[in-house]
Image (cartoon, rainbow, N blue to C red):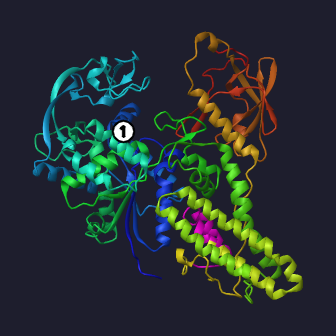
Amino acid sequence: MKDKKNKYLVTSALPYANGHLHIGHIAGAYLPADIYVRYRKLKNDDIIFICGSDEHGTAIEMSAIKEGVTPKEIIDNYHFSNKKAFEDLGINFDIYSRTSNPIHHDTSQEIFLNLFKKGILIQKKEKQLYSEREKRFLADRYVEGTCPKCGYEEARGDQCEKCGTNLSPLELINPRSKITGDTPVIKESTHYYFPLGKYQTELESWINTRQHWKPNVINYCNGWFKSGLQDRAITRDLDWGVKVPLQGNEGKVIYVWFEAPIGYISATKELFINRKEPEKWKEYWCNPEVKLIHFIGKDNIVFHAIVFPAILKANGDFILPENIPANEFLNLEGGKQSKSKGHGVLVKDIVKEFNPDVIRYTLASNLPENRDTDFYWKDIQTKNNNELAAILGNFINRTVVFAKSKFNNNIPNRYEEYKSDTDIFDYLSLQKNVISKHYDNFRFKDAINETMNCVRAANKYFNDNEPWKEIKNNIHRAETIINNCLQICYSVSILISPFLPFTSEKILKILNAGKKDFYWENTGKIILEADKSLGKNEILFPQINNNEIMQEDLNTTTEQQSESELIDLEYFKKIKLKVAKIIECEKIPNSKKLVKLKIEIGKKTKQLVAGISEYYKPEELLGKLIIVVDNLKKTKLMGIESEGMLLAAKKNGKLTLLTVQKEIESGSEIS
């Protein structure tokens, strides 16, 4: 093993602990970072991967009030749910911390106090809305009213969700507290500001030295510079958050935009405390030899490219980012994914249905590196069946099956090399350098495409050298070909491991190989020993059938329809909702979700297909009175006719059928 040469500190944007992760988040800031870190570790670089939950702010406090729980209960739920989602997808952080941890509060307060003692912070009085009844200032998310631009009567204090205008609470017409509904009064409150404009010249000069950054990041920063950087408030009147560490500031916390990025530093401290090396964090954050890489979505560019670097500069000693490879957005079949609106493919759901490496590959080969891209359910099937199974899985399987059937499941010997043998290994050795260049420049899609080209070349080598013919005429040649193919399998397991980590591990088990030589530089080398037995073979990528994809498509279509524009009363009257009684129920073979129901609606019977088998057993459904749409056009699911649709509610991944409170005859209309 060679010595470690480069030192990297990689961060992914801290996900907000107020909702479940969707695949748009993964494609933006987490999967690219994980791929990059895995690649760097294969190169034997010294690298740590930092992330954690962002757990403060008004949205969390509002959610807690609405649900009648504490903010701690909200963040605990989403922190552990999202942590598991990352683990299920193989996103492998060195630490996944929390900004509610004491070490983060201490670190944020320390940096705040350092700026205060240096005389950098500015105090300003500002007018804010105040609730006499609640005895508190109302932050923007605590206020709603009429938008002065479009007249929407439920605009938030920070933005009108109807017209998209950014607002302040004082701009709202007829503002009211979202908690009590009372009309607030205007009072003055004193807050601390960070003089961002003071650092504009220095920041512009620094970013001008970063011409290797993505154009979208540079352009976004220049847009802010053109408008002129302004002082930014770094404290708020809130109960939940990092307390302002100065006397006379009770009821005030440090603004989440200021303290959340500090979470990278506090998490690094926590990591090395856990490793019994409490001072080692400085070797990463205060070492100019370290390359700091922030992986984020484009909506976080200003905080990571302008605001956080300014804070680090003002404090002194800290390094600045080497690169910020911000991604654009991954949309869902033409529609934007939104955590707040509940529209998107949740990670916790998709990992139950599909192989995590298939998910990773589908997302990684369609990353929004330079423009927004779209996720379509059919891509899962296409990528699995036509690429992973047909190219990668096929090569591994045909090689191992041949070795098992012709060489007693052992690695055969190598004999005289032909030109085709040296050519394939030379090609792999050259390709690893091509792929490295793509990874080094954050071109993940190109790296993955070139990796799959290696597997295509491996299949071509197998076909061109025809071991099935050589076994009859030249046993030594057949042995050499299969030995080479098994060596290539090992090289392939190295090359795919950044984006297909689970599959890479499976290949190593199939080869009965360890990780002693599992380094990037060993791609294209002879590693496996002859005469050693192979492990148990398995199909790496079973085919995904149309029915599996059709059901997910149906779920997405239904969800998108529910997000559509408002309908008028006359349109709604066309929908015939009736009470129905379930008289027969059976699971549909080869489907995880679908059941076939026979329902009674008055004197007639109908057949329904519904995706509820994960939540209800057939015997639990018999005799239930449910609500159905009686005048829906017939459709077919998995080849079975469905003559209507039942109504159900879904919250936090749990589905509940809508029913009636009292016994009533089936066929009764809902009015």
What residue is pinned by disc 1?
60
63, 506: nearer the viewer: 506
Q: Amino acid at mark 1?
A: Ile
- Reply above or below: 388 against 582: below
| Crowd around label 1: few <14 · some 14–19 · many ≥20 (10 Å) | many
Can you see residue 534? no
Give residue 106's position: percent from left, percent from top: 22, 54
- Reply above or below: 446 against 552: below
608, 389: nearer the viewer: 389
- Residue 499 drawn in magenta: yes
Q: Is residue 33 left or right of residue 602?
A: left
Q: Is residue 598 left or right of residue 433?
A: right
Q: Main secondary structure of the magenta part?
A: helix
Give residue 184's position: percent from left, percent from top: 24, 20
Can you see residue 378? yes
Q: Is residue 388 left or right of residue 31?
A: right
Q: Could you tell me which residue is drawn at 34 percent across and 39 percent down?
A: 223
- Residue 306 drawn in magenta: no
625, 571: nearer the viewer: 571
Placement of the C terminus among the 4 image quadrants: top right
Give residue 287's position: percent from left, percent from top: 27, 67
Q: Could you tell me which residue is drawn at 42 percent across and 72 percent down?
A: 45
